[in-house]
Image (tube, rainbow, N blue to C red):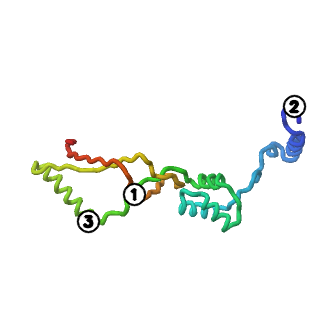
Amino acid sequence: MSPLQINHRTIYNWLNRWESEGMLGLYDKSGRGRKKTFNPEQEEKIRDWTREEPRQLKKVLQKIKAEWEIDTSTKTIKRILKSLSMSWHRMRRGVHGEPDPIEYIEKRAKLEEFKRLEDLGEINLYYLDEAGFCLIPNVPYGWQNIGEYLSIDSSRSKRLNVLGIMSRKNHL
């Protein structure tokens, strides 16, 4: 080792590249370092498998081993998912199903009629809502595309329910 902590072989290579290529010989060449384990098609397949099992990368590892006979680590899979703009974050609780579009339009029309009647002073319109509180958090984390949120169906558990009734004029 030289006093600058550089191997004499490295200095020899620098001088040879300087003589043969000039200044350009001192820049690092492309293609150095470890080659990728997976090609782009395999990375997309890993993304698809992760979407099927967003909470369990070990199942993805099993599929990789079975399909391509490649041993890899969860850290490698996480690195690939991050390069594919995915992140590990909390899932959201979703409402099960969509409302019937015709029924939704009818109910919206009725609500507009109730608002009109309240504006005329013929009725008092109040809104009722319910919220539940639970000490046990049960919304899991999973791999998801950045900016996209997976939702899981709501389920019942022991919790405290609270009702609130309020008018459009903020009267409770």
Q: Is residue 62 above or below residue 134?
A: below
Mark 3 or 1 closer to N-term?
Answer: 3
Q: Which label sits on residue 155? A: 1
Secondary structure beneath dot 1 equals: loop
- Distance from the alpha carbon under mark 3 to that under mark 2: 82 Å
Q: Amino acid at mark 1?
A: Ser
Quarter that holds the C terminus: top left
Closer to us: 130 or 121: 130
Q: Residues within 10 Å of mark 3 (few under 14, many from 20)?
A: few
| Residue ID at (30%, 65%) | 101
Extreme residue in the left direction: 122
Q: Residues within 10 Å of mark 1 (few under 14, many from 20)?
A: few
Q: Amino acid at mark 2?
A: Pro
Spot occupied by residue 70 in the image (x, y as percentages of width and height): 71, 62
Is disc 1 in contact with disc 2, using a CB cutoff of under 8 Å? no
Which residue does the numbered mark 2 point to in the structure image? 3
Q: Which label sits on residue 103? A: 3
